[in-house]
Amino acid sequence: MSVAEDWTARGRAPRLEIDLARTGPETPGGRFMRRFWMPVMRAADLPPGQAKPIRVMSEDFALYRGESGVAQVIDYRCPHRGAQMHLGWVEGDDIRCVYHGWKFNCDGQCLEQPAEEASFARKVQMRSYPTREYMGLVFAYLGEGAPPAFPPYPMPQAQGLIENQAPPVVPCNYLQCFENSMDEVHVAFVHKVGGSHSGIYDLPEIAAEETAWGMIRYGRRGNPGDQGERISLQTCRTARGSSCRRWPGSTAPAAGASSTSPSPRSTTKPTCGSSPTSSG
């Protein structure tokens, strides 16, 4: 018997249950999450001229970086015969399907169809998604309508180093991971024996701040080697399991982590992906 059924049996009004753990396109959680910019990959993991498959919120996409350096998220499959687009070739800032050579630009417009009449290509379009880069992460807007303002987070004011750690693959839904990551206290006990947080054994000083762009949580400890300030941005954790850590005055990243300094390109509007397009 579910909780709602139990309440009904006792003569009480059933409680409204909303499934927020699943993030597929048609779920309440998925519709909500798609209203925001989502980090989908570390920028350093996507070299120019390469395409990769990504799975975000139970949905598959293709992500490629053109030779000019601009990253772009597009549909996972070609609208012709359904071939996976990441298996194709990046040509300039365009991508060509591996199956029949159909070529698309970063707005999703078909440019070439080698075995078809030349005039037919303009009638075919796949969906492309607004794609931007900021603080060493590739962000995409996967929802309907115009995306919200970019960047989704303000640039840190203090001098320091921004690390984007390689996200682990965790066999659970995002809510379980996020709920656990927000709990700073458990680290002093669960991870005392070692593992990813080895040596972080002091109880932290915890603070949280609600901002116009989301919730930010701080955890400060006095352990040797962990003198930095651990900052978790909500959608960094939510979408891909990555976290951001700022080390004031640092000059080198921690072992096993990639780092980036904020760059002017982070806030420059790219030539493609500035607005969503629909399948044609």
Image (cartoon, rainbow, N blue to C red):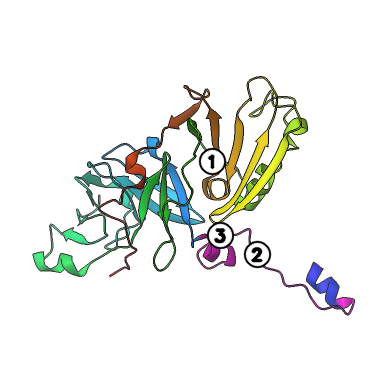
User: What's the residue type where badge 3 is placed?
Assistant: Thr
Residue at image location 48% in from the left, 33% down from the top: 162
Whether residue 173 is visible, yes or no, is no
Tag 3's secondary structure?
loop
Residue at image location 61% in from the left, 35% down from the top: 230
Q: Which of 277 and 116 is in front in this view?
A: 277
Few, some or many residues within 10 Å of mark 2 (<14, 14–19, 20+): few
Tell me the quadrant of the picture where the C terminus can be found.
bottom left
Residue at image location 61% in from the left, 33% down from the top: 229
Whichever of labels 1 and 3 marks the residue nearer the N terminus, that label is: 3
Q: Does the magenta stretch include residue 200?
A: no
| Mark 3 → mark 2, Cα distance in angstroms | 9 Å
Give percent across and percent down for residue 122: 17, 67
What residue is shown with label 1?
242
The label on residue 215 is none
Give percent across and percent down for residue 242: 53, 41
User: What's the residue type where badge 1 is placed?
Assistant: Ser
Q: How many marks?
A: 3
Whichever of labels 1 and 2 marks the residue nearer the N terminus, that label is: 2
Q: Nearer the viewer, residue 260 or 196?
A: 260
**Residue 175 vs residue 164: left or right?**
right
Tag 1's secondary structure?
loop
Residue depth check, mark 1 versus mark 3: number of the one nearer the observer: 1
- The magenta segment: 9-33
The label on residue 19 is 2
155 up-or-down from 276: above or below: above
Give percent across and percent down for residue 41: 43, 43
Whether the residues at callouts 1 and 2 have beta carbons within 8 Å, the answer is: no
Few, some or many residues within 10 Å of mark 1 (<14, 14–19, 20+): many
What residue is shown with label 3?
23
Residue depth check, mark 1 versus mark 2: number of the one nearer the observer: 1
| Mark 1 → mark 3, Cα distance in angstroms | 17 Å
